Image: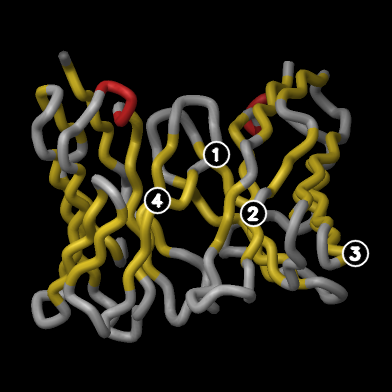
Amino acid sequence: GAVVSQHPSRVICKSGTSVKIECRSLDFQATTMFWYRQFPKQSLMLMATSNEGSKATYEQGVEKDKFLINHASLTLSTLTVTSAHPEDSSFYICSARSTSGPYNEQFFGPGTRLTVL
Amino acid sequence: QQQVKQSPQSLIVQKGGISIINCAYENTAFDYFPWYQQFPGKGPALLIAIRPDVSEKKEGRFTISFNKSAKQFSLHIMDSQPGDSATYFCAASISGNTPLVFGKGTRLSVIA
């Protein structure tokens, strides 16, 4: 149980285009999902907290107009990187919080490798 | 300000040996401490987690030791195997309701 999927796993796009990444909790409902960014050999950097049916909460320094987050259902959150540029190239990982267990564990998706040319 | 300090940054262990990774936290409100394992190009996978009401939790070859007074917790991997070679992250949150605060990670290499 507690499976989180992400789609696509890898995307290459031209500078200036927008890219949408989907995060789904497959076997549990998640009122809260998180989006992280990870650079090579570094830790995960929290970008935003996504709550179902409400606006996302962005971490300091993350441009909310550039990284649009939508959490329209209890199993789906999307991250759209608008007008992507090469500096946005990174590994984007989502996680979903399960409230069925005693610890409200967070389960991570497999990640999406974004390369902007 | 880094709220969770993890050490060592990298670790090489012989097959069959014990791998030990340490973390220290500052925020005394933290009460949920998970460990994640990440392979290259993959998302982190939850390994084991602990709450402060116990000092130790064991699941298979993985054990978390927790020292509340010292604000430290550690991961022990017994009988380390080459397949355990990965990056390990400790994390902390408040009742699992706040975003996880991650350590910087430890790259473990288990050599035969």
The mark nearer the N terminus, 2 or 3, is: 2
Q: Secondary structure at mark 2?
A: loop
Q: Secondary structure at mark 3?
A: strand
Q: Which residue is mark 4?
A: B47
Report the Cα–Cα distance between label 4 and label 1. Answer: 12 Å
Q: Which residue is mark 3?
A: A72
**In what quadrant of the picture does the C terminus of chain B appear?**
top left
Looking at numbered disc 4 in the image, what kind of residue is underneath it?
Leu
Density class for disc 4 (Cα within 10 Å; few <14, some 14-19, many ≥20) is some
Q: Residue at x 59, y 33 (%)?
A: A91
Looking at numbered disc 2 in the image, what kind of residue is underneath it?
Gly
User: Which colour scheme appears in the figure?
Assistant: secondary structure
**In what quadrant of the picture does the N terminus of chain B appear?**
bottom left
* Left or right: where A54 falls relative to B101: right
Report the Cα–Cα distance between label 2 and label 4. Answer: 14 Å
Choose between B70 and B34: the one closer to the eye.
B34
Q: Which residue is mark 1?
A: B43
Looking at numbered disc 1 in the image, what kind of residue is underneath it?
Gly
Q: Which residue is mark 2?
A: A1
Report the Cα–Cα distance between label 3 and label 4. Answer: 29 Å
Density class for disc 1 (Cα within 10 Å; few <14, some 14-19, many ≥20) is many
Choose between B60 and A21: the one closer to the eye.
B60
Of labels 2 and 4, the one closer to you: 2
Letter of the chain that mark 4 sits on in the rendering: B
Report the Cα–Cα distance between label 2 and label 3. Answer: 22 Å
Q: Residue at x 49, y 34 (%)?
A: A39
Q: Secondary structure at mark 1?
A: loop
Letter of the chain that mark 2 sits on in the rendering: A
